[in-house]
Image: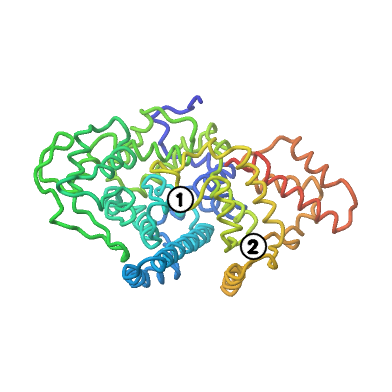
């Protein structure tokens, strides 16, 4: 891909004359999940700077801890203590019960997070936290403690727009990260290198910007980091910390873990690393920018004290972000596909794992279960014959009422609980499509394309949709049936998979 701007031009602010409807839709779809017409109109009224202030605010709304996670966190220490006193089959059954409670709690956390992320006012920040979680990766497969998983995401949210060094230091104390990268097992006599290696390779610097000796010495600095098994608290064990001098990046001292992080952020590669991850997650997963572009943005970011909110505003407000070569050609992740549909169709997240989490897993992105320490690869890896079929099937389910006679008792309880909290619009009903039936076929086709597709389509596309809408009986029932079918087909089509 040929880049139309040089490194000096790339990160300059978008000129006010280029802020228009297409630019607003591009920003909203890339920074968040989709671009609803009302949100586009608001962005145009407010302007780019004010819109970025709203998408990445000084004090973002944080997700509340789910009650199920809180109950489990309170109850599990006593339950585990009771299990430890058991033996034989009784102990085995009790252990299985603990595991099952954690599994259900992770499902509940996933549903609650999707519901939180689907709220239009907080969508961009929720996606930003998801981005950070794809850098500072942990997985429920190894971290079998839902409270720790929640706390990890909460740390990402609380520090996610502040100084990056403070975020990294907080993550080094995350019980989920300590478990995931084996810091609990790191001792003065036998430092575990997993965290130090991933700190440099996947969190801060990237491959080739540190030595094996830097890793070994840094691992010694992080000895003594511990996580309480059930309380979700960080604990420092001074008796297990190696306090002797260490030489890291050419400097020698009695360095602690925090000192190592400060030393890493002094390296030039630290400025370019997160911009590189931003490009992969938000701009182009297939074509990476040359290093000079990343270092140019990194130098700007470093000069501002590594403030993450400043980086977000610089990145999403830049000329490069809005360049034509990066528009309408990015494959949506399964989570973006799902939440984009929820927002576009003005639905609530279905509170049933079988109907929400299972489809996401089949599409290739199971919340809180990234495949490995590198996170989700994304891009063309999202698309295969199987995952496309799952995407199409998910769209179909949103246009068919839930068969409540086919729900088990737990699912019926979850559905009732959601409805009692005013969360009830799970599938598209006739009333939501009625407005389109009042339009002429050509107008309805244009409206569908404008509302749902990321780039303008060829006139022939609209003509084919309009011809379909105009074919057949003209009574209300048949017009509604054709509108429904056209909408489903559009959302299943290749254009809607892009943003």
Give the residue drawn at x 38%, y 44%.
135
What residue sits 65% from the left and 56% below the top?
345
Q: How many marks?
A: 2
Q: Secondary structure at mark 1?
A: loop
Location of residue 114 in the rendering, given as x and y in whole percent from the top left corner:
52, 58
- Tell me, yes or no, if residue 496 can be seen here: yes
- The reply, left or right, for residue 200 in relation to residue 154 is left
Residue closer to the observer: 408 or 291 = 408
Counting residues from the start of the chain, the first of labels 2 and 1 encountered is 1
Percent position (x, y) of residue 299? 30, 36
Q: Nearer the viewer, mark 2 or mark 1?
A: 1
Q: Position of residue 214 (x, y in %)?
A: 20, 36
Q: Nearer the viewer, residue 123 or 385?
A: 385
Where does label 1 land, which residue?
A: 369
Q: Residues within 10 Å of mark 2 (few under 14, many from 20)?
A: many
Q: Is residue 65 visible?
A: no
Crowd class of label 1 (few under 14; some 14 to 19; many from 20; radius 10 Å):
some
Q: Disc 2 versus disc 1: distance between alpha carbons?
A: 25 Å
Task: Quarter of the image for the C terminus: give it.
Answer: top right
Res 402 → quadrant: bottom right
- Is 63 left or right of 210, judged from the image as shown? right
Residue projecting furthest to the bottom: 420
Residue in view at x 35 percent, y 67 percent: 87
Which residue bears the numbered disc 2?
426
Q: Is residue 467 above or below residue 368?
A: above
The quadrant holding residue 79 is bottom left
Which residue is farthest front?
88
């Amino acid at each position: 891909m040929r880049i139309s701007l040089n490194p000096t031009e790339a990160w300059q602010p978008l000129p006010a004359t280029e802020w228009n409807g297409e630019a607003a839709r591009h920003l909203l779809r890339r920074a968040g999940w989709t671009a609803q017409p009302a949100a586009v109109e608001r962005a145009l009224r407010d302007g780019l700077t004010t819109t970025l202030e709203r998408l990445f605010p000084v004090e973002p709304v944080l997700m509340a801890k789910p009650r199920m996670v809180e109950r489990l966190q309170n109850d599990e220490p006593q339950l585990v203590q009771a299990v430890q006193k058991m033996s034989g089959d009784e102990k085995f059954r009790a252990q299985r019960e603990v595991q099952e409670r954690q599994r259900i709690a992770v499902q509940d956390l996933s549903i609650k997070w999707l519901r939180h992320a689907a709220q239009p006012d907080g969508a961009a920040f929720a996606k930003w936290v998801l981005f950070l979680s794809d850098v500072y990766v942990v997985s429920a497969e190894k971290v079998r403690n839902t409270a720790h998983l929640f706390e990890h995401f909460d740390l990402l949210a609380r520090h996610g727009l502040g100084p990056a060094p403070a975020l990294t230091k907080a993550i080094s104390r995350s019980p989920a990260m300590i478990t995931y990268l084996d810091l609990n097992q790191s001792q003065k006599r036998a430092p575990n290198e997993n965290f130090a290696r991933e700190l440099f390779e996947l969190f801060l610097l990237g491959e080739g910007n540190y030595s094996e000796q830097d890793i070994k010495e840094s691992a010694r600095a992080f000895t003594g980091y511990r996580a309480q098994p059930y309380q979700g608290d960080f604990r420092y064990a001074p008796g297990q910390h190696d306090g002797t001098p260490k030489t890291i990046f050419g400097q020698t001292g009695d360095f602690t873990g925090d000192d190592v992080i400060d030393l890493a952020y002094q390296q030039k590669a630290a400025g370019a690393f997160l911009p590189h991850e931003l490009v992969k997650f938000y701009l182009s997963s297939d074509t990476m920018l040359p290093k000079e572009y990343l270092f140019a943005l990194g130098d700007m970011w470093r000069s501002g004290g590594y403030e993450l909110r400043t980086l977000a505003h610089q990145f999403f407000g830049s000329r490069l972000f809005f360049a034509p070569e990066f528009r309408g050609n990015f494959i949506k992740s399964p989570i973006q596909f799902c939440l984009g549909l929820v927002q576009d169709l003005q639905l609530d997240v279905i509170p049933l794992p079988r109907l929400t989490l299972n489809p996401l897993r089949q599409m290739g992105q199971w919340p809180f279960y990234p495949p490995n320490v590198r996170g989700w690869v994304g891009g063309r890896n999202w698309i295969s014959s199987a995952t496309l079929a799952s995407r199409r099937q998910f769209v179909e389910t949103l246009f068919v009422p839930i068969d409540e006679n086919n729900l088990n008792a737990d699912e019926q309880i979850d559905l009732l609980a959601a409805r009692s909290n005013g969360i009830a619009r799970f599938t598209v009903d006739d009333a939501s499509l009625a407005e389109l039936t009042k339009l002429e076929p050509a107008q309805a086709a244009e409206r569908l394309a404008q509302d749902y597709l990321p780039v303008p389509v060829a006139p022939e596309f609209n003509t084919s949709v309009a011809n379909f809408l105009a074919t057949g009986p003209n009574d209300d029932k048949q017009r509604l049936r054709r509108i429904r079918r056209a909408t489903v087909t559009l959302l299943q089509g290749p254009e809607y998979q892009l943003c």
